[in-house]
Amino acid sequence: MEIVVPDEYKYLYVRNAERPVVKVPDPVLRQVAAPVTKVGGTESKLIDEMMRVMRKANGIGLAAPQLGILKRIITISPHGMRPLALINPTITFREGSAIAQEGCLSIPGLYGDVERHLKIEVEAYDRRGKPVAFEMEGLPARVVQHEVDHLDGVLFIDKVGLATLHWMHPEGSDDDVE
Ligand code: NI
């Protein structure tokens, strides 16, 4: 799907120091990110930067390709949860389904309903390189599925209910963006 950005949203699509997230149609968002083979200082710095950008943008999730880095690293911060970095995340179990609205920091202003699995289990490495596993349900599970899709070059607009797509100003809205 080609996104035609309305004039009044175009300023959100400029990438600069204030808005460092890569936006559509940058081809990096459509590439498959490479697994991290060793967790070191470079990855630690990248995670710090992802956390900073996510917080500043009021995002609840971010994937490294959204900063132009093709590594399998995501950060998530669903409401009420301590921010978490997951390296090489793999979804090992999926159950149920739920439909809810999503947005994306790489497609600012566009929202729509996406069907996701309700419950998942995810295995990954933490920022110290230690294996971790989580069971998640609801919003955290949704955010992880959205971010893991980013690592495979998949965007929420590929899965959205087309009739539900709509533009809405992200500033001043309480809507979640990933
Ligand atoms: Ni996103």
Image (cartoon, rainbow, N blue to C red):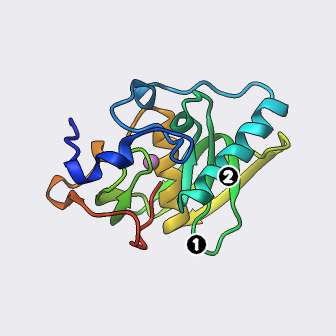
Residue 146 in percent (x, y) is at: 46, 50
Q: Can residue 176 be seen in this view?
A: yes
Residue placed under numbered mark 2 in the picture: 51
Residue 174 in percent (x, y) is at: 43, 73
Q: Label 2 vs label 1: CA separation?
A: 14 Å
Q: Which residue lies furthest to the left in this view?
A: 163
Task: Give 30 or 37, whichever is nearer the viewer.
Answer: 30
Q: Is residue 120 left or right of residue 12?
A: right
**Callout in the foreground (2, 1):** 2
Disc 1 marks which amino acid? His
Q: In this view, does 59 lie to the left or right of 107?
A: right
Residue placed under numbered mark 1 in the picture: 79
Vertical position of residue 65 compared to residue 158: above or below:
above
Q: Mark 1: few, some, or many residues within 10 Å (few <14, many ≥20)?
A: few
Q: Mark 2: few, some, or many residues within 10 Å (few <14, many ≥20)?
A: many
Disc 2 marks which amino acid? Met
Task: Give 98 or 26, whichever is nearer the viewer.
Answer: 26
Vertical position of residue 62 compared to residue 100: above or below:
above
Residues at circles 2 and 1 in contact by the CB criterion of under 8 Å = no
Dot label at residue 166 = none
Residue 40 in percent (x, y) is at: 84, 31
Q: In this view, does 76 lie to the left or right of 32?
A: right
Residue depicted at x 85% and y 43%:
128
Residue depicted at x 23% and y 45%:
5
Q: What element carries label 2?
A: helix
Residue depicted at x 54% and y 48%:
18
